[in-house]
Image: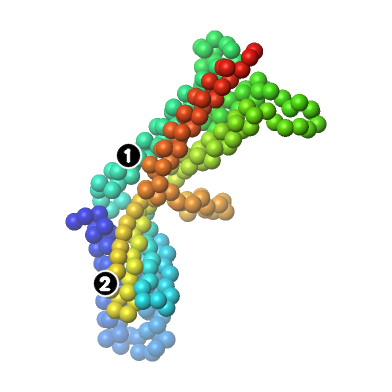
């Protein structure tokens, strides 16, 4: 049984048990009134999606679509293996970004590499190492021609754009490292005869219920988006190396 079929069976089993309970309740006479039957049916719907987060939408068109997020791991699969492989690749790619940031710190301090290493690696996180590097680099970049205005030097503009792009991607890296993982099953159903038109599944990283209590929720990251993140981090590595070359060519 493949990954998608296993998840479908799990969901369909919940649904069939819930409907059987509804049938037995009506047959036994426990739910004789319309209101009681309607109340039970609403309960059946809740039970059918117990353990899942259901997000569905429908309209007057021939088909409707919806999805279920299952937040535990029902079975190992190639889909899971591929997903966690790319998560590992993306996170490890940031080690090279840190190496390039170290090179920039070394250039700015012009000190013994051993001393630079002590300073850099005593700074515990990527975010704080980026801030350290930014402070050092901006201390050696050209200043504005006039203290009260004027344009920034082109090298400053390049550096600040690079730092912004690093911070944008760093938030995704932190989400990959610390957020929850869930399976999404998305189904499109023909309303007329309740037949399945199409169904697909994917894994994604999403904000946990506990973190949502802070009042913030980040967009989920799908498994299909991970290769693009890796490529973007590789581009950062290239740009950091090019920026160091640009600094090295500047006259003292």
Residue 119 in sight: no
Disc nearer the start of the sequence (2/1): 2
Question: Could you say which is closer to the camera, residue 217 or residue 197?
Answer: 197
Image quarter hosting the C terminus: top right
Is the residue marked by circle 2 packed among few (<14), some (14-19), or many (20+) residues within 10 Å?
Answer: few
- The residue tagged with tag 1: helix, strand or loop? helix
Q: What residue is at 37 percent from the left and 84 percent from the top?
A: 37
Residue at 24%, 63% (x, y): give it: 9
Q: Quadrant of the N terminus?
A: bottom left
Nearest the eye: 16 or 98: 98
* Residue 211, numbered label: none
Q: Position of residue 17 (x, y in %)?
A: 27, 71
Q: Residues within 10 Å of mark 1 (few under 14, many from 20)?
A: few
Q: Nearer the viewer, mark 2 or mark 1?
A: 1
Label 2 SS: helix
Asked where in the image residue 83 lies, by quadrant, the reply is top left
Q: Position of residue 126 (x, y in %)?
A: 51, 31
Q: Which mark is residue 16?
A: 2
Above or below, comparing residue 197 to residue 95 in the picture: below
Residue identifier under label 1: 85
């Amino acid at each position: 049984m493949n990954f998608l079929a296993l998840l479908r069976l799990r969901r369909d089993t919940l649904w069939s048990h819930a409907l059987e309970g509804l049938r037995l309740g009506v047959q036994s006479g426990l739910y004789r009134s319309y209101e009681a039957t309607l109340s039970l049916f609403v309960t059946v719907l809740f039970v059918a999606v117990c353990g899942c987060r259901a997000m569905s939408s429908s309209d007057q068109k021939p088909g409707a679509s919806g999805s279920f997020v299952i937040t535990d791991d029902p079975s190992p699969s190639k889909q899971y293996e591929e997903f966690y492989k790319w998560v590992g690749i993306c996170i490890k790619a940031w080690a090279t970004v840190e190496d390039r940031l170290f090179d920039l710190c070394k250039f700015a301090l012009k000190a013994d590499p051993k001393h630079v290493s002590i300073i850099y690696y005593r700074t515990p996180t990527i975010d704080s190492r980026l801030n350290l590097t930014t402070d050092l680099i901006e201390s050696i970049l050209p200043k504005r021609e006039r203290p009260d205005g004027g344009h920034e030097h082109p090298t400053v503009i390049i550096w600040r754009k690079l730092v912004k792009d690093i911070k944008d991607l760093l938030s995704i890296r932190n989400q990959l490292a610390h957020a929850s993982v869930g399976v999404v099953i998305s189904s499109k159903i023909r309303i007329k005869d309740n037949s399945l038109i199409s169904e697909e599944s994917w894994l994604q990283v999403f904000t946990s219920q506990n973190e949502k209590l802070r009042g913030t929720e980040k967009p989920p990251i799908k498994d299909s988006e991970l290769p693009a993140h890796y490529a973007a981090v590789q581009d950062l590595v290239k740009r950091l190396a090019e920026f160091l070359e640009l600094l090295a060519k500047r006259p003292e």
